[in-house]
Amino acid sequence: MALLIETQPIPLSTDTDGVLRVSGTRVTLDSVVHAFNQGATAEEIAQQYTSLRLEDVYAIIAYYLHAHSEVDAYLQQREERAKVVRHQNEQRFNPAGIRERLLARRG
């Protein structure tokens, strides 16, 4: 009996903001790769993100290991974009004294 070898698509899709997410979930590629790089196993990642299927986590880890430099470049772009957005938000909404203002509203 011969095994049928077929290629499965990588379970990633791009949302409207250009963010790669695990298909059918809100979990980002960033989250899976970060957890993996922190030493989490595929099983631990699937337990942490209950919307993920274990086989999808394995497929994404395999993709990451195969296309390490491209994924790292994507993650670096995302990090740089996050810094820009954070800076823009801090310019629009000064975070200085936020705790005191929130406590004053509550009291």
Image (cartoon, grey):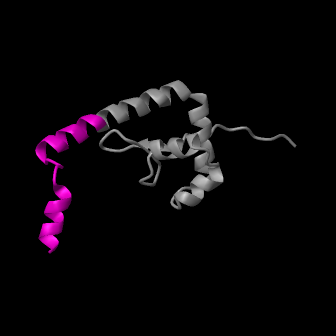
Q: Main secondary structure of the magenta part?
A: helix
Pick the front one: 25 or 31: 31
The magenta region covers: 83-107
Whole-percent x, y for residue 101 in the image: 13, 61
Pick the front one: 26 or 45: 45
Whole-percent x, y for residue 35 in the image: 54, 46
Q: Which residue lies furthest to the right in this view?
A: 1
Whole-percent x, y for residue 43 in the image: 65, 54
Quarter residue 88 falls in: top left
Q: Which residue lies furthest to the bottom in this view?
A: 107
Pick the front one: 96 or 39: 96
Pick the front one: 27 or 41: 41
Whole-percent x, y for residue 13 in the image: 43, 43
Quarter residue 52 falls in: bottom right
Say whether residue 13 is left or right of residue 47. left
Q: In this view, does 105 lie above or below 91?
A: below
Quarter residue 10 falls in: top right
Q: Which residue lies furthest to the top in this view?
A: 69
Q: Is residue 77 above or below residue 53?
A: above
- Say which residue appears at 52% left-offset and 41% top-offset: 33
Q: Can residue 64 be seen in this view?
A: yes
- Say which residue appears at 20% left-offset and 59% top-offset: 99
Say whether residue 85 is left or right of residue 63. left
Residue 7 among those drawn in magenta: no
Q: Is residue 60 visible?
A: no
Image quarter where the C terminus lies is bottom left
Say whether residue 99 is left or right of residue 105. right
Image quarter where the N terminus lies is top right
